Amino acid sequence: MRTLAFLALATALSAQTPRPGVNYDEAKAGGDSLPDLKLTTADEWTKTRRPEILKLFEDHVFGKTPANLGTPKFEVTATKKDALGGLATRKFIHISLPDRPAWQGMDVMLYLPNDAKGPVPCFCGLSFGGNHAVSKETDIPLSTRWMRESKEKHIVDHKATEATRGTESSRWALEMILKRGFALATAYYGDIEPDHADGWKDSLRAAVSKDGADTVWKDGEWGAIGAWAWGLSRIADYLQTDAQVDGKHLAVIGHSRLGKTSLWAGAQDERFGFVISNNSGEGGAALMRRDFGETTAIITKAFPHWFTKTYTRYAGNAAACPVDAHMLIALAAPRPIYIASAVDDQWADPKGEFLSGKFASPVYALFGKKGVVAQEHPAIDQPVGDFIGYHIRTGKHDVTDFDWTQYLDFASRHWTR
Ligand code: GTR
């Protein structure tokens, strides 16, 4: 009993352990004055305002994704028809850029339900650990493209190793996804860019830049999130060539920094008909003008490589940034989008994540659609929303079956109506 009580206390404390200089007092969060969406009509939004806001995110937050990196090449390198005890077909697809041979390419792992009657809708997302970490199957090749160790003590090293086999499987609800008639396509974010300050030297970004690994990071140029988001779009390119996939029904999903990535991928690439932010927090769904949990100052110090250089100017000065997270959510409009928070993830500012959906809702109204519907932060484990789904779940910073249940329900609801 004592152990259990201690564990409960330790969990509660760790969720809100005060870090010096980090505010967890709602009364002091501020962030009430947001940049104006300047809404007129749906037509004007689509033709003018949306492209303006997209450009502001390129210039000030994520950097511009280079165009014309050449036509990607797809090679199906393996197919297993009786994966997961016969539930699925598993394919590996190597994606490369023949015009940019310096990039080593990425390996997509695609699971398709075997009882499908035709092409199936597909969820696409990057993993922290690699394909072998996503699935419990033990015959999945290990990526070897993450070459140097991270030198920074505060950055968790996500280099793929034998020790991480299956370790992310609880985050991917694979059997549930397949049994409900969806496919899952995933790839390792380290194939695109190893995630630490020097990772870009072995990354797509260095491989395609004219100066290679001597490139100086400049204002407006893409950071790691931009590169990872580019990778998600290449997965979409492949999926649209696969006859077993319904290329008109693609969802993009990501957790945490990869949730910031899925939001940016969904903003740039409208083929993603459903966008999911799982606990994306600062630089993702959380309003940056709110001082609650992680802030622009903290994130740009700890992870400058995720963003464009310009973004560092807003450290301690988020109010000067011409955009905020409600505009990132609005870039998904009128497509369905889902924002998920967790109670013990105060670092990601759950209320700020909810408010970005609430304040993006008027853009959906332009298209005659309802966004979040709730005016106040909803009760725990009570999903709300129509075209902008939202929930705050019990538990910690993670992706759980509860989260996936909502995403699958949401996709089914929107894609059958
Ligand atoms: C944290 C970071 C968050 C979030 C998270 C993650 O350290 O402060 O912004 O991205 O990492 O990706 O797990």
Image (cartoon, rainbow, N blue to C red):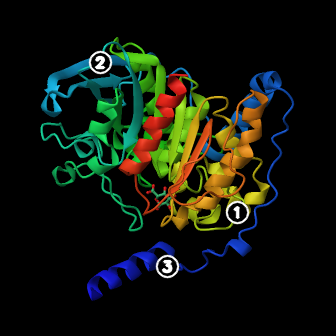
Give the percent coordinates (x, y) of residue 17. 49, 79
Viewport quadrant of the C terminus: top right
Q: Name the residue under label 2.
A: 116
Q: Residue at x 17, y 54 (%)?
A: 163
Q: Name the residue under label 1.
A: 290
| Mark 3 secondary-structure assignment | loop
Q: Residue at x 56, y 27 (%)?
A: 269
| Mark 2 secondary-structure assignment | loop
Name the kind of residue labelled 1 in the image: Arg
Label 2, residues with CA under 10 Å away: few <14, some 14-19, many ≥20: some
Q: Is residue 299 left or right of residue 94?
A: right
Q: Nearer the viewer, residue 70 or 42?
A: 42
Give the percent coordinates (x, y) of residue 287. 67, 55
Q: Name the residue under label 3.
A: 17
Q: Which of 23 and 274 is in front in this view?
A: 274
Mark 3 or mark 2, which is nearer the start of the sequence? 3
Mark 1 or mark 3, which is nearer the start of the sequence? 3
| Mark 1 secondary-structure assignment | loop
Give the percent coordinates (x, y) of residue 68. 53, 20
In the rendered structure, find residue 314 and report the number of the disc placed on it.
none
For residue 139, which quarter of the picture? top left
Name the kind of residue labelled 3 in the image: Thr
**Distance between mark 1 and mark 2 Cα atoms:** 45 Å
Labels 3 and 1 touching (C-beta < 8 A): no
Mark 2 or mark 1, which is nearer the start of the sequence? 2
Name the kind of residue labelled 2 in the image: Ala
Q: Is residue 168 left or right of residue 234?
A: left
Q: In this view, does 169 lie to the left or right of 103?
A: left
| Mark 1 or mark 2, whichever is nearer to me | 2
